[in-house]
Amino acid sequence: MNDAVLLMAYGTPATLDEVPAYFAHILGGRPAPPDAVEELRERYRRIGGTSPLREITLAQAGGLARALRERGREVRVAVGMKHAPPFISDAVADLARAGVRQIAALALAPHYSKLSIASYFSAAAEASAAHGLSLRMRESWHDHPGFIAALAARLRVALAAASDRASVETIFTAHSLPHRILSWSDPYPDQLLQTSALVAASAGVTRWRFAFQSASHTGEPWLGPALLDVLREFAGGGAREVLVCPVGFVADHLEVLFDIDVEARELAHALGLCLTRTASLNDGADFLTVLAALAAELLDGEGAS
């Protein structure tokens, strides 16, 4: 097989013992302060000790290979992580050794930012060049009809389970980034709002808000409003039921399982709010269909950025 697909994700430590090395990699090789490492370890403990991100990403890769096979394409699908094994560079090297000559690379994050997705592509491009491989990439797919339909389907299911759908406050969320990206005319915030509006319209939701979550403590301002602040605002306005739809994520991981399911839910409970969340896309058949369509376009030389 001369062609391959490379799925790229953020990465996660496999055990609590790997948290310091993982944290240091995120910081560009600088060790994190011990108290920050312990705080991150505690977050993993609160969700069961580890994140399922690696296993889910591997399941997505396996499902994508099957979906492409059903389309008549026998294509190798590899996984590369930005901050943890298997690293993007190692995945590309493995593909080169397997005789692959062309890679279609997809970041498992639908919304583009120079501060986030660009670094995935840079790592893939550098490794591909080192091995003489051709690389095709797609910067964003935030408005792909299948992606919107998959999110809307999960939103409708969650709304149907609400005690009073008419009174539910819907909040779409994504990972915050430093406020300085706005000075670059970075498309990230606008793409998130576009996704949210499309999903809301598809699910028949007319009243919704967007909020950022998971901002890091870096000493600089990050994009807002923050999810926790929006929860306080809703509680102050008399809301009783809140539904969170994390449109910026395609898998269960720490930012979903802790930041929403633990931290946000605990605050909501303290505020007298009932907080629920839409199911993640993970390796759902509808999402695998989306990935297969995106990968096929890239392999055919279409949709590349």
Image (cartoon, grey):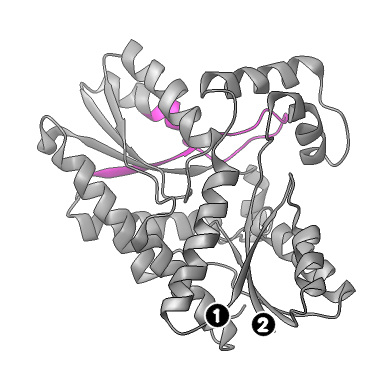
Above or below for 214 versus 46: below
* Rendered image: mark on residue 99: none
Pointer 1 local density, CA inside 10 Å: few below 14, some 14–19, many at least 20: some
**Alpha carbons under labels 1 and 2: distance apart:** 8 Å
87 left or right, relative to 58: right
- Horizontal and vertical percent position of residue 157: 20, 46
Element marked by disc 2: loop
In the displayed orientation, state which residue is furthest to the top: 270
- Horizontal and vertical percent position of residue 292: 46, 72
The quarter of the picture where residue 243 lies is top left
- Residue at horizontal 85%, vertical 42%? 28
Element marked by disc 1: loop
- Residue at horizontal 78%, vertical 70%? 125
Tags 1 and 2 in contact by the CB under 8 Å rule?
Answer: yes
Give, as a single range, the part of the protein colored magenta: 207-230
Q: Nearer the viewer, residue 111 or 62?
A: 62
Which kind of residue does numbered mark 2 sit on?
Answer: Met
* Res. 176 in view: no
- Circle 1 residue: 74
Which kind of residue does numbered mark 1 sit on?
Answer: Glu
- Circle 2 residue: 1
- Residue at horizontal 40%, vertical 16%? 266
Going from the N terminus, do you reach mark 1 or mark 2 first? 2
Q: Quadrant of the N terminus?
A: bottom right
Above or below for 142 versus 272: below
Q: Nearer the viewer, residue 201 or 3?
A: 3
